[in-house]
Image (spheres, rainbow, N blue to C red):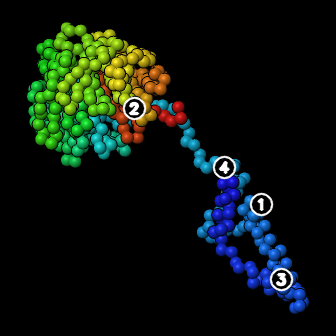
Amino acid sequence: MTDLHARFRTLDSLSAPNLWPDIEERALAMQPTHRRRPWVLIAATLLLALVIGGAALVGSGMIELPVPDGASPAPSAATSSSAPSSTPEQAREPSWIATGSMIAARSGSATLLLDGKVLVAGGTDSVGFQLGTAELYDPSTGSWTATGNMVEARAGHTATLLPDGTVLVTGGGNSGSSAELYDPGSGTWAATGSKITPRWYHTATLLLDGTVLVAGGSAVVGGDSPLALASAEVYDPGSRSWTATGNMIEAREARTATLLLNGNVLVAGGSGSAGSPLLESAELYDPNSRSWTATGGMIDDRFGHAATLLPDGKVLVVGSGGFGIGQLASAELYDPASGSWIATGSMIEPRSGPATLLLDGRVLVAGGTTDGGTDGVLASAELYDPASGSWTATATMIEARIGHTATLLREGTVLIAGGYSSLEGLASAELYDPGSGT
């Protein structure tokens, strides 16, 4: 029926001649003068029936009419049924693709900028020295270019993209109290207000009002035993200043901080001071009251784990590790509605490593280590499906690595950069393509 309508629309677009004068003239010519009027009506009726019947045949596709230049007739029923309107793209398998190597081997921070480029800054080099250099990855060319050096070399810092497109880098360094801003427009760094408490291996969370919550971490940058912190403070980009906010219930480092859909921040796991047990506890920061409250504790105590906010508002926490601590394959979900944790499918391999939310809602965990050190560095990768609560193996990375960054790019691929292999620091980078039709 749709095709029939299209054919009549095509017919309507053609300019039809006025047939009545010709019909009448032919009918009159065939009959005596005194009988013209009755035969004229009969002949006109017959010719008109032929015209209408022909239009119906054209509309049904039984007769094809030539179409004037500029008109676009609909395809015939036979043509439209045998030729699909579009050819589906051939399905691609998930894969890893080598891309340009960084200028310096490093384990630093990675930030996706508003223009789609990725800023990698600071970190430690292949022998453990702190770096002050920074570089940019351009997805359109697959190459890296140097950008301005930071004011201070630093590792164990955080990097946060602010609403205006600048990047706030805090902590680490020699003092642990300094902070600076990167301006992508000029490619330069400038010092901003110093934090109240020196710290590294803390968390930095962009809140809904554009301020940044920095919490916990370690108070010592040198070789002494680190002292876990419970303090927290907020950076205001407008005034470029820091303000103390409520302390966490427990001092903790190497834990995760996740911004929930309601604007609160979930902090989970980590450890206290050196020699203290790992933590399974969790707490919530409320920006409105600037205070912390306890929430349900995790099923497993975790340190150096990964946390990912899922599209449904739940938080996936997976893995554990660091400093020779046994790794976990288990995973669990935090439900903000109930304030409780529930177990979900375990990973195929116990590991610690970054977790990345893909555009289709699945979570990629790639690389990491099975023993908390460099002996068990992994190249394998796996995917978590929130719909089924299960993990499946996916393509293996080109290089095994730990301490690398994982950044979701605009087109849906994931950039893995730097880190360490079992022997040395890495400058190499690779892209994960989730594939299609799988």
Task: Give the image location of residue 254, x and y in percent.
Answer: 24, 19
Q: Is residue 164 above or below residue 12?
A: above
Q: What amino acid does circle 4 point to?
A: Ala
Residue placed furthest toward the bottom: 33
Q: What number is the disc on residue 83?
A: 4
Q: Residue 72: give x, y in percent of width and height.
A: 62, 64
Q: Quadrant of residue 234?
A: top left
Q: CA distance from mark 2 to mark 4?
A: 39 Å
The residue tagged 3 is 40
Kind of element beneath mark 1: loop
- The three-letter code of the residue at mark 1 reads Met
Marks 2 & 4, CB-CB < 8 Å contact: no
Q: Is residue 347 visible?
A: no
Q: Nearer the viewer, residue 399 or 265?
A: 265
Where residue 313 appears, as percent x and y from the top left, is 37, 29
Residue 95, relative to residue 251: is it above or below? below
Residue located at (82% from left, 80% from top): 41
The disc, 4 or 1, on the residue closer to the chain's N-terminal end is 1
Q: Position of residue 315 (x, y in %)?
A: 35, 25
